[in-house]
Amino acid sequence: MNRPLLNPLIPACALLLLFFGCRSITPSVSYYTMRTLQEESTTQALAPNGSHRTIGIRNVLLPHVINRTQMVRRSGNYAVKIDNYHRWAEYPDRMVLQLLQGNLQRLLPGSQVVKAPWGVGREPEVTLSFHFLELIGSTDRKMELDVVWTLLDGQKPSLTRRTHLIESTDGDGFEDLARAHSRLLAELSREVAETIAERNDQP
């Protein structure tokens, strides 16, 4: 007598089994970050006895296609791959700004490196802006950095430079890609720090 009452439960049970079965095979998401020079004990300061100036990073601009939490790689001249299961722990523009701030503080310990916004009347003596044209790896184990950066230094003429770097990654994994980001940004940081140190020595 009760057998007909079980029939409506069969489809519901089947749907539940399908739902939980699909969830069990969904890949987990891996998160990655970039490391600063502060975490490398071999880093040498460029100006250990600096002039105690304040250096401000006004902005860091990245192309929209890469300024997302998903890891992005070039897979051809006109194609990119966006991976939903390998992600940055933070939006890249924020991570890059924090990394540049940490690197420059390590390389120029006599100065104070701050990021915008800063309070009224607390304008840094040196300000930096970074406009990245490229900051992306590729599926053929290469990493490219292309950035135009501007330095404003008090009464001295402003300086605008373009830094373009390409190097091979250690492998084709996403952790290799994160390390390559860190290495190229470290090279950029050294170039910027050397420029600031040289201008400090100029009358």
Image: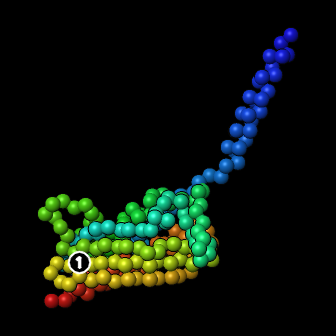
Callout 1 secondary element: strand
- Is residue 202 shown above or below 141? below
Q: Residue at the spot x=62%, y=52% of the render?
A: 28
Q: Residue at the spot x=18%, y=83% of the render?
A: 156
The residue to which callout 1 is attached is 152
Q: Quick check: 179 left or right of 202?
A: right
For the view shown, which residue lies furthest in the front direction?
A: 78
Viewport quadrant of the C terminus: bottom left
Viewport quadrant of the N terminus: top right
Q: Nearer the viewer, residue 185 or 40?
A: 185
- Is residue 82 shown above or below 79? above
For the view shown, which residue lies furthest in the top direction?
A: 1
- Is residue 89 shown above or below 45? above
Q: Nearer the viewer, residue 66 or 25?
A: 66
**Number of callouts:** 1
Q: Quick check: 73 left or right of 89?
A: right
